[in-house]
Image: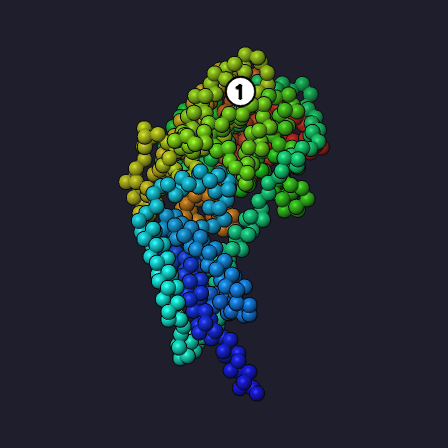
Amino acid sequence: MLSDLTKRIGKVLVKPFRKHLLFLTAFFILATSPYFVRLIHNHEYFYSFILFMHCSLVSYLVTLLIGLIQHKNTRRFVQILLIGVSSILFILNIYCIFEFHSLVDSDYIMLVLGTNFNEAKEFASDMIPFNILFSIISVFFFLIFLCLFSNRHPIKFGKTLSIIALGFILICALKEVYKWGIWEDGPIGHFKEMYLTFNDYDMPDESQLIHEPPIISFIENQEMPTNVVLIIGESFARFHSSLFGYEKMTNPCLKALYDKSLLFCIDSIDAPAPITSLSLQYMLTTFNREDKKHKITKWYEHPSVIELMKNCGFDCYWFSNQARAGKLNYIARVFADSCKQTFYYQQEGAIDYNNRLDIVLADSSYQYVQKLNLKNHHNFIIYHMMGSHFVYSKRYSDDFNHFSKNEYLKYPKNQRETLATYDNSILYNDYVVNQIIGIYKNLETILLYVPDHGQDMFRSSHDYHTHGKINDPVSYAYGVEIPFMIYASPLYQERHPDVIERIKYRQNHTKVWNSENLPYLIMDLIGVKEVDGVAVHPKSLLN
Ligand SMILES: [Zn+2]
């Protein structure tokens, strides 16, 4: 009786090797192999073997579970579905491993959503290297061969081999118990991370954007400036700015303004998130991370800085060199479209789509701004730059090809070219911001420059750059370190000496401040006391 039961259990346990070996192999290669291949690619051989064992166990368990489905067609359907999804993930993963030394993760997917399909294509159009194509094609040929072969000769292990394989799986299981937590680096942990990120992602439909106008109270007798300008930068890591201590001169133009006390640099400021779509939610509304934590309200239920400025009597204008974005993500567009007038310079379908350089922002807005100022209204003008968005080498013109990889010899070989192109993009950014400032130098203007977030430039790991990772505290911390600059035109300085004193004080006495409170700083600058009952001063940078 007992031996009968043991036999039956044994039969079930070896089924993945006896009956579903083809599925097991395909699943193992497509769904799990990128996890240990990545480590081999990074020369971490021992840990890659540990992950190999974990992946074997996961593949075995998945195959075993599916094998329990009695209905043949249902089982086939589930198998085909899993192989289909795994194939897509396999291609993406292998591409990312060879291109960026990391797996496709929520950051990349958010990047795709945070921009749009065309920008994602830019990733790929950078030429898919031959070795990647070769690896992917050979794996698929191998699987097709196995498939055809199995039609004539069923692929399965013999009895002895099955028992040996089962023994190996048992060792893997024991290892798993002994070294609990390894799943975090395998497919299960990977999916968990992606789930956590997407859970954070929140887009309204149009009806949800309509709400009560904010209640605003003003400080008496405070004069409002004619022009408030906000330049939203992109992917600018503070530790790559010479104005904030970086060894290479990446901010020469702005340094000249700084030396004349026209530009002020405020240190120690963090962005609320390392990804555009998330950080803009906080930066441009009164929504903050505490609200998010308590899940009481959503970002789009809070007034945006555009709404606030409109209610204070400002006309709002938006100049953007970022994509208009599609349905999945149009966070920037929600703000842009609520302005009096919006200009997008990335023309979909154009040859230089998403590669148009930021100087277009300065060139195209010059005349427009001069005309606005003739009317002597209060203007709130926003520039949304492409900045140093990955791919860095596409963000500057040839004459800004100043830094070369030979100047980065103290860094590992794989980082040099990337660091050089990144610094060139910062150098170009310096030029463009200076050109935009030039438009306002003879007008009464207070101008803020703040990027949406920074970049983890190989700081958290020797082989990772681009956005700080949401679920990696070290990468996250680097990814939110941003430079913060305030320009005040001579005319503004003459009319608002008290504000200048406060800015100078803050420049010399830094405090912990997050750019999620940007709307309160802007409110402070135009003399607002309270927004919806919340005092502006305590939340302002200048307090
Ligand atoms: Zn961004």
Identify residue type, mark 1: Thr
Q: Residues within 10 Å of mark 1 (few under 14, many from 20)?
A: many
Residue at 62 percent across and 25 percent down: it is: 309
Reading the image, the residue beneath label 1 is 445
Residue 487 left/right relative to 431: right
- Count of numbered tags: 1
Mark 1 C-beta to ligand 1 under 8 Å = no
Task: Point out the image quarter for the C terminus.
Answer: top right
Task: Point out the image quarter for the N terminus.
Answer: bottom right
- What is the quadrant of residue 444 in the picture? top right
As drawn, the residue found furthest toward the left would be 406
Q: Nearer the viewer, residue 51 or 263?
A: 51
Q: Nearer the viewer, residue 122 or 43?
A: 122
Could you tell me if residue 497 is visible in this image?
no
Percent x, y for residue 386?
45, 33
Percent x, y for residue 151?
39, 67
Could you tell me if residue 396 is visible in this image?
yes
Residue at 48 percent across and 55 percent down: it is: 85
Residue 246 left/right relative to 205: left
As drawn, the residue found furthest toward the front would be 152
Residue at 41 percent across and 57 percent down: it is: 34
Percent x, y for residue 466?
43, 43
- What is the quadrant of residue 401 in the picture? top left
Q: Secondary structure at mark 1?
A: strand
Q: Nearer the viewer, residue 181 or 87?
A: 87
As drawn, the residue found furthest toward the top would be 374
- What is the quadrant of residue 172 in the picture? bottom left
Residue 141 left/right relative to 211: left
Q: Nearer the viewer, residue 292 or 446?
A: 292
